Image: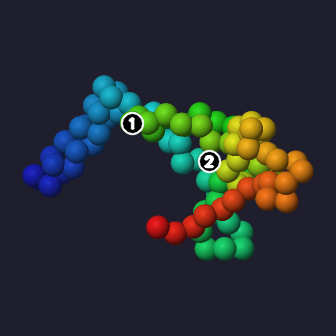
Amino acid sequence: MSAFAGLAMVGLSELVVRVVAPQSASWLDIYRRDSALPFHTALPNLDRLVDTGETHWRIVTDDRGFRVASQPDAAHASPGSPFGGTVLALGD
């Protein structure tokens, strides 16, 4: 009988927490499972403000799901330079 009472109290507690302090919608729906690789990638063509409850940030992706700047940065582009473009650095 005490196991049933304990289970009922857990259910009632969950209901009270959901009514008193509801959680915001998950921001994790910006990801999808990659069809070819064993991990998740960002959805394509996103432009969304994300609120995790602790931080606020914006994610913008291109048609392949890669994160891109919200607007092209013309100050760093050098059309005549062979070194103009994007640099990707990985590591510590």
Give the spatial CA distance, label 1 vs label 2.
Answer: 18 Å
Q: Position of residue 26 (x, y in %)?
A: 50, 42
Judge by depth and name the residue closer to the eye, 27 or 12. 27
Q: Is residue 45 visible?
A: no
In percent of the image, x 71 and y 69: which residue is there? 35
Q: Which residue is mark 2?
A: 30
Tell me if residue 6 comes above or below residue 49 in the rendering: below
Residue furthest to the left: 2
Report the amino acid beneath label 1: Glu
Residue furthest to the top: 20
Q: Say left or right for 15 vs 66.
A: left
Local crowd size for mark 1, using a 10 Å CA cut-off: few (<14), some (14–19), many (≥20): few
Local crowd size for mark 2, using a 10 Å CA cut-off: few (<14), some (14–19), many (≥20): some
- The figure's colour scheme reads rainbow
Q: Position of residue 58 (x, y in %)?
A: 59, 37
In percent of the image, x 11 and y 53: which residue is there? 1
Tell me if residue 84 comes above or below residue 46 in the rendering: below
Q: Say left or right for 47 vs 90.
A: right
Q: Position of residue 40 (x, y in %)?
A: 60, 63
Q: Which mark is residue 20?
A: none
Judge by depth and name the residue closer to the eye, 41 or 9. 41
Among the two numbered marks 1 and 2 on one chain, the one whose residue lies closer to the N terminus: 2
In percent of the image, x 24 and y 38: which residue is there? 13
Q: Is residue 35 visible?
A: yes
Q: Which residue is mark 1?
A: 54
Which circle, 1 or 2, is nearer the viewer?
A: 1
